[in-house]
Amino acid sequence: MLPSGNFTFNDIHMVIPSGTTSTSLNSLISQGKWGDDDGDGQGAGGVTASGSISLVIKDRDGATVSRNDTLSICNAPYKVTLDSTEGTLETRYGMPRSSLFHSGTVDYYITTPQPVICSVRPNLLLGGTSDIPSHDNPRYAGPANIWSSTKGFLVQSTNPSSYELNFPTTGADGLYFDLLIGGVDGSQLTWSPVTHGGITATVTSVAANDSWIPGVDRGKVVARVTLSGPRADSTQLNSSNPSPLTSPSLPQDFELVGSDGRGNEVRYGFVLRQWFVNRGLQTASASNQTAWCNSLGYRMPRVRDLTNAVCSGWNSGRYCRGTVGATPSSGNNVFRRHIGAGFFTEWGYMSNYADVGFVSFNYWTSDVVGGNGVYVYTYDGSVFTDNVSYSGYAVCTAP
């Protein structure tokens, strides 16, 4: 079991000296780490040995770990492999004087006493995952204490009084994310759906094969959280004056509890503050899309509801001047992954989510700059101004 505190693998006592990954058996002999049942080999040079023993440590993903590395619950279980070569043990006197031994391997596992959720993984694309699609870039990655380009959002709080610090703060029907759990196979846990304010969070075990899953994690069974709530039906999507749609009561606290049936539980909490409804493939002018949202009983979002892009740095120019995104801003005219800094910022490349209804294009906002409307590109959260008669897509929000 992993101890509590900051320990490295050098703190785990082994026959191999601290700070090294191999040693000769003769070196162990010189340190007195041997014995003979009938007392042969006493005194200097009384016993010699050939052969060696080596050490390899790998984390849960199969990555090699240094003995200087700090043990982490989120990288457990660790596999510690000791390999010995063929060799001989020989004493100066005695009968027999030598013994031949064969090579061998033994594996040990270091695990955690209690499972813990380490990170939550929405779509990683457009989050600095440059090893998955070539067009991704580190500029999209959030701060290292909040975002991992391979694991998603790091857990910010396990205290119910500050669950609002965790992902997600926004949602839409059908969106999903994975709970990456240290110390236990997520498929061994059972979960109950949680419903608040007209929104349900359901956890199921799935083999993660989405396009954004890193190769080392592809196909692994994870606990996947799917949000369900108000969504426009086909009649509402195709109507310019749709009937009202139920609006969820927000904000709402959600706490998901997974149990292994032996009294061990793992918990994850978050607070939903905004709910979004999109119009599918229907495009229209800014005023018509605004009217559609209002007919549902929702509103057209501001730029800051969708992205933390800012009109500076990379991808900026006259076409985005005067636009205002969420804070903390990305520093460029694209989003930078962050919790609570816009719907697209949190969830990433929206059109990749199966059966959610978003496309990779421009969505109108209620912001106006110099008489022009402002839209946000779902692909990377970039912001542009254009004539309000331009035909764009619609996403609405409540509250």
Image (cartoon, rainbow, N blue to C red):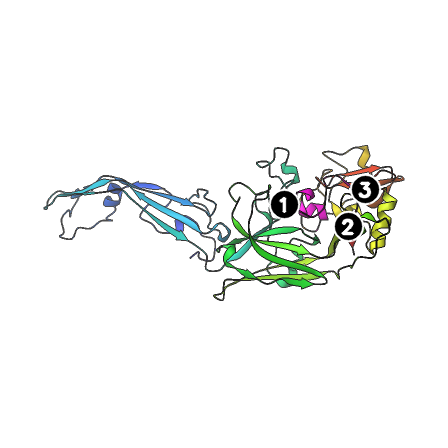
Magenta region:
340-363
Q: Is 134 placed above or below 241 here?
A: above
**Separation of disc 2 and disc 1 at Cα?**
26 Å
Asked if residue 148 can be seen in this view, the reply is yes
Quickly name the residue at label 2: 234
Image location of residue 281, percent across then percent down: 77, 43
Q: Is residue 300 left or right of residue 53?
A: right
Amino acid type assigned to the residue bearing label 2 in the image: Ser
84 left or right, relative to 237 = left
Q: CA distance from mark 2 to mark 3?
A: 14 Å
Of circles 2 and 3, which is in front? 2
Q: Amino acid at mark 1?
A: Asn
Q: Nearer the viewer, residue 20 or 174?
A: 174
| Tag of residue 283 | 3
Q: Mark 1: give few (<14), some (14-19) or many (20+) Cα within 10 Å.
A: many
Q: Nearer the viewer, residue 18 or 330?
A: 330
The kind of residue on which mark 3 rests is Thr
Q: Quadrant of the N terminus?
A: bottom left
Residue at horizontal 54 percent and vertical 61 percent from the top: 190
Number of other residues with Cα within 10 Å of mark 2, as a class: few under 14, some 14 to 19, many 20 or more: few
Tell me where residue 272 sits by quadrant: bottom right
**Residue 213 image label:** none
Task: Please tell me whether mark 3 or mark 1 is closer to you in this view.
Answer: 3
Work out whether mark 3 precedes mark 1 in sequence or the reverse, and give the earlier one: 1
Q: Earlier in the sequence, mark 2 or mark 1?
A: 1
Q: Residues within 10 Å of mark 3 (few under 14, many from 20)?
A: some
Vertical side of 115 occupied by 279: above or below: above
The answer to whether the residue labelled 2 contacts the one labelled 3, judged by CB atoms less than 8 Å apart, is no
Residue hosting label 1: 123
The image shows residue 320 at horizontal and vertical percentages of 80, 37
